[in-house]
Amino acid sequence: MFLGYRQIPHFIIAVAKEDSDQRWVIRATIDTHRFNELVKSVRIGKTGEAYLLDADGIFQTERRSGGILMQKDADRYKYGAAHDGIKTFIETDVQGQTHLYATTWLKDKSWLLVVRQEKNDAFKFLRKTAYVVVLISILGGTAIVAIAFYLTGWIIRRMQRVDAEKDQLGDQLIRAGRLAEIGEMAAGFAHEINNPLQIIKSEHALVSMILTDLKEKDLLKESEDVAEMEDSIHQIKHQVDRCAEITQAILKFGRKTEPVIKDIDLHAFIPEVIAMVAKKASVHGIHVEQHISDALSPIHTDPGQLQQVVVNLLNNAIDAIIARHGAAGGELRIEAESDTDQVEIRVRDNGIGISPENMKKIFTPFFTTKPVGKGTGLGLSMCYGIVDKMGGKMSVSSQPNSGTTFTIRIPITAEDSGDRTGQKLFLK
């Protein structure tokens, strides 16, 4: 590259060949403007540029940020001595701008190719990447810490819930044991009460006989006082008979016996079971209704176990009605009907109902929605176990604040099988 006669830069490529007596030169003139534009067009990022210098530091191409062709580069001393390969470094130019440089000497180290870019521009993406990495690290760390705190809290709450359930289970087991003991003692109490009842009954018979003899011997005149005395004697007999029925029902309910399979007439059985809870229902203003089909066939099963199931369902229904209606507006209905091969017994109430999330757990042992001390969670699970032992199942349908219906289906006849009771129940 040199200035021609008209002081215009020329870019010449020449190849010489010498013979013994002659020297040949092949010369090509390159369009300096196009070559200069070609090198200047190299762009890296926003401020990156490329240019050529000769061995004396004279611009062989123009520099976009300031550098006139064929003038010396004021920054030529910063490039150092001639070197092999590519050299990179960061340096501040005469204008005070810091650049990232990459230099390499071309063939025979006649020309130096310089590529430079402002430091801030060169490291922009690296800094952006670093910021993104830092941001991701902060967000990731925060998320990890938050998740760790959440999971730790969840585990702690879960453990506390398990401990609470464990404690509640222990309390329920203790209460269940106490209830079992009370049940056994109640049967004993009923048996003991029967003895004085028999004495009272005998004394009543004696008083009645004496009163009759006195009237026959005309030693006792008819009067208002005599009539009241006879009425009182009649009331004594009525109340003694009533107490005897209650104690017999308790003994029958609490008696520990092996299942006895026999025919049960539900026309007599259901009123007898309802009588056991009728007083509790009437005290709380619950209207009890029974609907027993006239064509109802007898069923073949154990009456004690069936009585336990039905009484438990009735008591649960009364509790649900009280929870919703208090002392008025409760309705309890027990229905029984049959088809050709089975009897269906339904216990309906208009109580508080069962929530959908509790429907799956309704037959789980020790699960109860009643307050602490009001229930053990064993009633329905025991009923379900009794029904399952009989060879069938029990179903329930309910709507919150609408009511609940428990349904069992019992075959009219069934085959005995090993330890089973001979009764088969089917889901409705």
Image (spheres, rainbow, N blue to C red):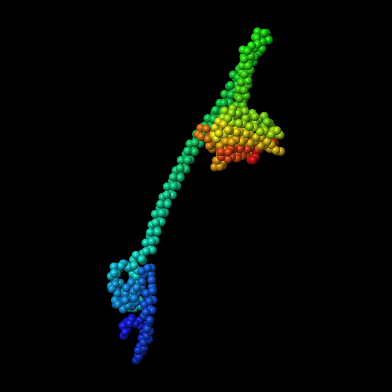
Taking depth in this image into account, of 284 and 198 the one nearest to the observer is 284
Image-quadrant location for residue 339: top right
User: The C terminus lies in which quarter of the figure?
Assistant: top right
Q: Residue furthest bottom?
A: 21
In the rendered view of the protein, which quadrant contains the N terminus? Answer: bottom left
Residue 99 drawn above or below residue 356: below
- In the image, what residue occupies the spot 66% across and 35% down? 336
Name the spot of residue 135 as percent of width and height, x first. Answer: 39, 56
- Write down the quadrant of residue 389 in the picture: top right
Can you see residue 141? yes
Say if 98 sits above or below 106 in the image.
above
Q: Position of residue 35 (x, y in %)?
A: 38, 78
Q: How many dots with numbers?
A: 0
Q: Is residue 260 left or right of residue 120?
A: right
Question: What is the x, y in percent for residue 138?
Answer: 39, 54
Can residue 262 be seen here? The reply is: no
Residue placed most toward the observer, 263 or 225: 225
Which percent across, then down, holds residue 274? 62, 30
Q: Quadrant of residue 354?
A: top right
- Is 428 above or below relative to 274? below
Instruction: Identify the residue shown where x is 63% and y is 34%.
Output: 334
* Residue drawn at 28 percent across, 70 percent down: 94
Q: In the figure, is residue 48 to the left or right of 378?
A: left
